[in-house]
Image (cartoon, rainbow, N blue to C red):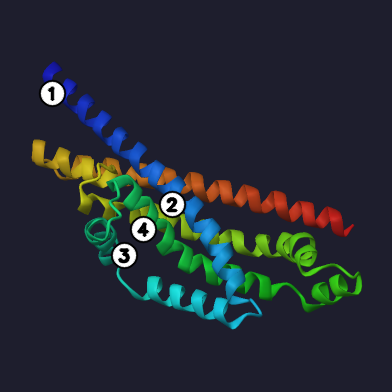
């Protein structure tokens, strides 16, 4: 009995190690996705056609192609072109770039959702385009973006499972290792599901709290 308990303690540690890798992928991937989404979203609204075309091509490519193919291409093809990447770097890069394509449309839509009167008021105050975006438009648009950004972050979390295909020891990979070593499928994958669920709840609650704080801040400024 003690040996069995000891074995399952070791397997729990494996799951937690995998959860740590998954968490790193999620946080770093979200950072890349967030920066990329803002850059691409603003490019989609640019007055310069070249920037709009570039952003549109990027978004359509990453939204229209398989993340599996993107992952394999980055891991196996880029080294042939002289750009070798470690598995962790590959996973973070592909996840971040992929989700940024979806986030870009969120940024564009949120900015366009800001009432037109706000743009007109900012122009009347003789604010520069940067000042209008920084002080008037974005503070309101970000509140609109947050719920969908939260959903995108959770989707990125779930998409981290694909990195097991390049032998990165994430949560799904470790659950598979335990299954192979014990012959038990239910326990390790139920454990993995629960960990994914807990992380997603933390993300959801965090985004909701941030949304409430920012919305209250806007209400205060209006009064």
**At 18% across and 20% down in the image, what residue appears?**
6
Tell me if 81 is positioned left or right of 215 in this view. Answer: left
Q: Does residue 1 appear in this view? A: no
**Tag on residue 29?**
2
**Tag on residue 94?**
4
Tell me if 181 is positioned left or right of 57 in this view. Answer: left
Element type at mark 4: helix
Quadrant assignment for the C terminus: bottom right
Element type at mark 1: helix
Image depth: mark 4 or mark 3 in front? 4
Quadrant assignment for the N terminus: top left
- Residue at the extreme top: 2
- Crowd class of label 3 (few under 14; some 14 to 19; many from 20; radius 10 Å): some
For disc 1, the marked residue is 4
Give the percent coordinates (x, y) of residue 87. 28, 47
Q: Quick check: 203 above or below 115?
A: above
**At 61% across and 63% down in the image, what residue appears?**
145
């Amino acid at each position: 009995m003690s040996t069995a308990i000891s074995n399952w303690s070791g397997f729990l540690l494996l799951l937690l190690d995998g959860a740590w890798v998954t968490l790193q992928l999620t946080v770093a991937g979200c950072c890349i996705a967030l920066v990329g989404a803002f850059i691409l979203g603003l490019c989609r609204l640019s007055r310069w056609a070249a920037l709009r075309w570039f952003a549109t091509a990027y978004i359509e490519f990453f939204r229209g192609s398989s993340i599996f193919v993107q992952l394999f291409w980055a891991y196996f093809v880029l080294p042939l072109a002289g750009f070798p990447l470690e598995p962790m770097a590959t996973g973070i890069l592909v996840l971040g770039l992929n989700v940024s394509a979806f986030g870009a449309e969120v940024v564009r839509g949120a900015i366009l959702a800001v009432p037109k009167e706000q743009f007109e008021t900012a122009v009347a105050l003789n604010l520069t385009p940067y000042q209008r975006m920084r002080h008037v438009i974005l503070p309101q648009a970000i509140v609109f973006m947050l719920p969908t950004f939260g959903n995108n972050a959770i989707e990125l979390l779930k998409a981290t499972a694909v990195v097991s295909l390049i032998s990165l020891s994430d949560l799904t990979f470790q659950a598979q290792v335990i299954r192979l070593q014990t012959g038990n499928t239910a326990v390790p994958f139920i454990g993995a599901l629960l960990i994914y669920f807990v992380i997603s709840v933390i993300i959801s609650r965090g985004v909701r709290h941030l949304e409430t704080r920012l919305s209250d801040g806007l209400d205060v400024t209006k009064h």
